[in-house]
Image (spheres, rainbow, N blue to C red):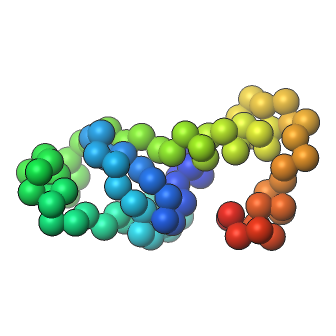
Amino acid sequence: MMVYIAEKGSIAVDGISLTVTQVTADSFAVAIIPYTLQNTNLAQLAVGSPVNIEVDILAKYVQRSLGQQGGTGTSELTQEFLAEHGFC
């Protein structure tokens, strides 16, 4: 799932849309504003609590376009092009 997570991108944790602030090889961090913390179930979660994670659908479309997830691979859009233009 980490391939779909990008810094400054969106991710949903238990249906709550959050902005990703940091990504490592095997984890990510989000910033939670006080309003969101007070008005959702996030404050009741503990480290290790199971949650539902939904990644940005746009990332899935890009990967499919690149032919890496069952796509046709016929797109001229490449990882190199995206990196050169600040998307990777």
> In front here: 34 or 63?
34
Relative placement, left or right, of 2 versus 22 is right
Residue 28 visible in this rendered orientation of the protein: no
Q: Where is residue 4 in the image (x, y as percent from the top left)?
A: 56, 49
Q: Which residue is depicted at the point 28% across and 46% down?
A: 16
Q: Position of residue 45 (x, y in %)?
A: 14, 51
Q: In this view, does 4 lie to the left or right of 18?
A: right
The front one of 5 and 24 is 5
Residue 10 screen position, x and y as percent: 45, 53
Quarter of the rendering containing residue 46: bottom left
Name the residue at 72% across, 37% down: 64
Task: State the residue at coordinates (71%, 70%).
Answer: 86
Would you place residue 18 above or below residue 30 in this image? above
- Left or right position of 7 against 87: left
In the rendered image, the residue lying farthest to the front is 35
| Residue 69, picture quadrant | top right
On-image quarter of the C terminus: bottom right
Q: Can residue 6 be seen in this view?
A: yes
Where does the image place residue 41, in percent across and percent down from the top left?
13, 46
Above or below residue 15? Residue 23 is below
Please tell me how many numbered marks the rendered image carries.
Answer: 0
